């Protein structure tokens, strides 16, 4: 239903602004850039916006350099991709307010903030939904578009390794590879390359790891980040590493930003749900991978979040197939 509405409003639009979330990941950049390329192939004007710096590893995605930070220009439609609430769009949302808004997302926590909401948590990535749109709108895949879209799928499934990977997505990955996208090149760029500074910071953070009632957690302070020279702390994927610890059902990394706010990155084993915890604190995500941003200070945030996570670590939802 909303998939048809999404198609319809995109067919009618002529000048489209596509905005994605702050702290962008591969799926954010992939779905925004992919949709822009599809719209341009249909003869429309389209621009992508992200109100944040882009981590270096995302430079492997074609056309990433065209993404602008400030949303200026004249548009007749705003599309939000991979953002579960309007706050995640940063200044892009404020600049483009008043336009009809198409909200395309796969987060179960999506607040349905669009004029039209196409939210499908069964999609492994928003980029998968954009692939469906390309097919619906009759845009053929070429090597470049296929690489852009595969990047988001590979990013959100951690290289096709999450619990939600199924035969459907593997068939789609096959189609993207037949069109010319390279799975090994994207896995390498997104997961196998990291700056030395990240490894040093990783080491420091591992020294402080604690496990309590099934919750494994650690802290990255401003001082630790400054000493390592690494600005994008979520480049670390430290929470994804910690959830591999056998004694843990839930993992959390608390990162202190330069403005004193605290970012919380959370992961859960299959059957446990951190999306509900994130949502309760104004954030969002998926049952196995979610996050939120709190005003701080660190010593207030940690006990608050840990109490909620310990409750979540007691409540098994049964084995679920929902991934990130
Ligand atoms: P990560 O821990 O990898 O940064 O994020 C895991 C998931 O949670 C991603 O789907 C991401 O979009 C979502 N997420 C992380 N931080 C926030 C936040 O502050 N607000 C919302 N709504 N979602 C978040
Ligand atoms: Mn996503």
Image: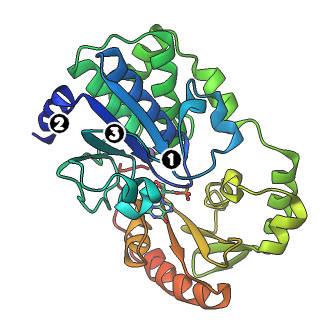
State yes or no: discs 1 and 2 in contact (Cβ < 8 Å): no
Q: Where residue 129 appears, x then y in whole percent?
A: 31, 34
Quadrant holding the N terminus = top left
Closest to the observer, 61 or 171: 61
Q: Is residue 183 left or right of residue 231?
A: left
Q: Where residue 62 appears, x then y in whole percent?
A: 57, 23
Residue 167 shows up from this direction = no
Q: Which residue is mark 3?
A: 74
Furthest residue toward left: 1
Q: Secondary structure at mark 3?
A: loop
Q: Which mark is residue 50?
A: 1
Q: Residue at the location (18% across, 26% down)?
A: 11
Cα separation between marks 2 and 3: 25 Å
Q: Secondary structure at mark 2?
A: helix
Residue 238 shows up from this direction = yes
Q: Earlier in the sequence, mark 1 or mark 2?
A: 2
Q: Residue at the location (29% across, 31% down)?
A: 15
Cα separation between marks 1 and 2: 24 Å
Q: Which mark is residue 208?
A: none
Q: Which residue is mark 2?
A: 3
Q: Earlier in the sequence, mark 2 or mark 3?
A: 2
Q: Residue at the location (53% across, 15% down)?
A: 181
Above or below residue 203? Residue 183 is above
Marks 2, 3: nearer the viewer: 3
Above or below residue 184? Residue 7 is below
Q: Where residue 198 appears, x then y in whole percent?
A: 81, 52
Q: Earlier in the sequence, mark 3 or mark 1?
A: 1
């Amino acid at each position: 239903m909303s998939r048809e509405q999404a198609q319809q409003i995109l067919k009618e639009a002529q000048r489209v602004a596509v905005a994605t979330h702050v702290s962008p990941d591969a799926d954010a950049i992939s779905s925004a850039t992919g949709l822009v390329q599809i719209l341009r192939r249909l003869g429309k004007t389209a621009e992508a916006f992200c109100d944040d710096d882009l981590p270096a590893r995302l430079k492997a995605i074609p056309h990433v350099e065209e993404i602008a930070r400030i949303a200026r220009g004249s548009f007749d439609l705003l599309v939000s991709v991979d953002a579960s609430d309007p706050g995640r769009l940063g200044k892009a949302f404020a600049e483009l307010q008043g336009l009809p808004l198409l909200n395309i997302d796969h987060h179960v926590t999506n607040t349905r903030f669009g004029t039209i909401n196409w939210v499908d948590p069964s999609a492994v990535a928003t980029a998968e939904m954009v692939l469906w749109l390309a097919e619906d709108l009759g845009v053929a895949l070429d090597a470049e578009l296929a690489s852009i879209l595969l990047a988001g799928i590979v990013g959100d499934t951690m290289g096709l390794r999450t619990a939600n990977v199924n035969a459907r997505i593997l068939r789609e990955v096959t189609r993207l590879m037949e069109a010319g996208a390279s799975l090994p090149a994207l896995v390498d760029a997104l997961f196998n390359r990291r700056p030395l500074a990240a490894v040093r910071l990783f080491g420091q953070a591992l020294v402080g790891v604690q496990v309590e009632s099934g919750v494994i957690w650690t802290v990255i302070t401003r001082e630790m980040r400054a000493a390592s020279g690494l600005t994008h702390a979520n480049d670390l994927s430290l929470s994804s590493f910690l959830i591999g610890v056998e004694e843990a059902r839930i993992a959390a990394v608390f990162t202190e930003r330069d403005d004193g706010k605290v970012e919380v990155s959370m992961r859960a084993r299959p059957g446990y749900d951190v999306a509900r915890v994130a949502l309760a604190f104004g954030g969002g995500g998926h049952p196995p991978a979610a996050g939120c941003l709190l005003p701080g200070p660190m010593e207030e945030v940690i006990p608050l979040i840990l109490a909620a996570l310990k409750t979540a670590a007691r409540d098994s939802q049964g084995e679920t197939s929902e991934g990130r």
